[in-house]
Amino acid sequence: MNSLGLQTYVELFHFPSLAQSNVFNLTYMQSDNARRLKNSSKTYDILVAFFRPVSDPLASKYCFTIHHFDIEDNIIQPVTKTIDFAYLPGASDIVCINSLHDEITGEYFVAIGFVKEGEKGYLNIYRSKSEEKLPGMFYLGCSEYVFFAEDCLSYSKLLCAPLHLTHAHCLIKDELQWAFFLSFGEPFSEISSQNKPSENQPGVKIFSKLIDTNIFYQVESDQNTGSSGLSQPQTCHSNPEYGELPFDVAVILFPELKQLPTTSIFLHMDFKIINNVRLSSFGSQDGWFGFFAVDMKSLGIIRHFNLSHESPITSIKIFQRVNVVNLTSQEIIKDNDEESVIKKDVNCLVCSAFEPAVVYCNIFKNNGFSIQNQLILPFSTDFDHVNCASVDDFNLDGKCEIILGTFGQRLLYYEWEFNSRTESTNGQFILKAQRLLPGPVFCISPALDLIGEGPMSLAVVTSRGLHIFQHDTYCLVKEIHHRLNTRSFTLNT
């Protein structure tokens, strides 16, 4: 029996909030280990955003904090820096943030969606050059933050309020190209009817490196001559290579956009790549949610499933119960018929505002979402609605567990248990532990190595600030000894 879990996590650090955060205000970025730790382990730093309280003259003018963790004399030393990005007016509310690391160029990108006074929305994209990577700035001096903050690639005016911001990848010339996905809400009241977003397009915008997508312009114009009715992106480029993709180009690289309902407001999106297949999921305010499997080489949709719940979708996650990175190419079967199946199980966690959180198991095997492959997470509605969720290997057993964060100040931890009586799923998720926090839970990170020593940490944002959890050292060592002894006994027998 695995003794690790949420019950063995202890709070290492608590960083009080500078101001209020929301469910889209946490992101993480890969650290520069070559400079910091001089080893091959992949560690991460945490970036948290806050609403800037403009009306409070005593409040901090900074609306971002970056948290980095070092080890000195066998003691974990947190390093926290405040940062204020350029082109962010003082009278602005930070709505959403996301970051990514370009493995090809070695550059770091941060995207920020915010709203100004007078109902004006924007998305800014910032870059840290490869020779001056963001995490290395902790050692190069505070002035390096100023350089990064002023390297704004594009600032795009939005006709609607920004909501969820995340990123996905597509294949261009056999190389992975990143793209920020931004969902948005209702148009601002001051927007004229002529400038409102097209009713024939879903509520998602794509921002990426424009120079890599030029090859698609002529192809699409030949296929859709006379389609000038599409709204054009309003992007002011400090670097002309980056900005919003026109919709007719975005739907080529991301064909799942064509299948999204145009009347929905999307509150959460999630993406996962298995081999050359991109799995995409979208959850909307009206309860609709959809799942797509897209062949990234042929740019065709392999499978598409959708269903509706009776309340807004607050979080949606794609995962496999066995925590693996990639599948081999032999595990994807394609036929001219309806048989496009990924052999290993692919599951989808769907959290609703006023309904229990559920897991739809083996989506491909069960041909979509239905009651037959639906597993309800027990007690998920007992602590107000679920704000956020994270799916990862939290107990180090090689399988995925689920942590839900609720408005009722609880973390709910679920583990998979096999059950021979459940023939369709061969098991169920059991509530193994829960933890009371000092405020409503807004964001939960996946299991991250923040220190570089191996044990994974958990970053949680509540109304009281950022909390960093890690397995208790005694419990971790005890479990390691137990597993080694069990393995030794098995080998000897």
Image (spheres, grey):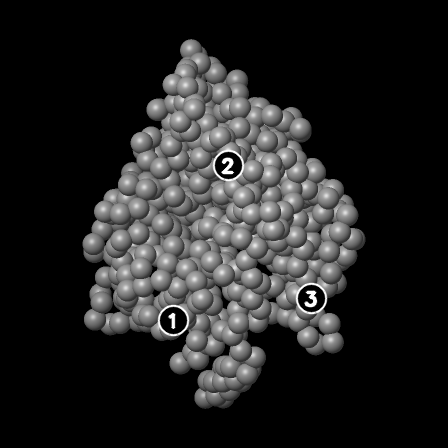
Callout 1 secondary element: strand
Circle 1 Cα neighbour tier, 10 Å, few/some/many (<14 / 14–19 / ≥20): some
Quadrant where the image shows the N terminus? bottom left
Residue 178 visible within the image: no
Q: Is residue 204 above or below residue 200?
A: below
Q: Say which label, 1 or 2, has the lower sequence index.
A: 2
Q: How far is mark 1 from mark 2, CA to CA? A: 35 Å
Q: Quadrant of residue 426?
A: bottom left
Report the front residue among 59 and 451: 59
Residue at image x 50%, y 52%? 20
Residue at image x 65%, y 45%? 84
Given this view, does label 2 or label 3 mark the residue nearer the observer?
2
Q: Position of residue 37 (x, y in %)?
A: 72, 64
Which residue does the numbered mark 3 point to in the structure image? Answer: 70
Q: Say which label, 1 or 3, has the lower sequence index.
A: 3
Residue at image x 68%, y 69%? 77
Circle 3 Cα neighbour tier, 10 Å, few/some/many (<14 / 14–19 / ≥20): some
Q: Callout 3, which amino acid? A: Asp
Which residue does the numbered mark 2 point to in the structure image? Answer: 115
Given this view, does label 1 or label 2 mark the residue nearer the observer?
2
Q: Position of residue 62 (x, y in %)?
A: 63, 48
Which mark is on residue 434? 1
Q: Callout 2, which amino acid? A: Val
- CB under 8 Å between callouts 2 and 3? no
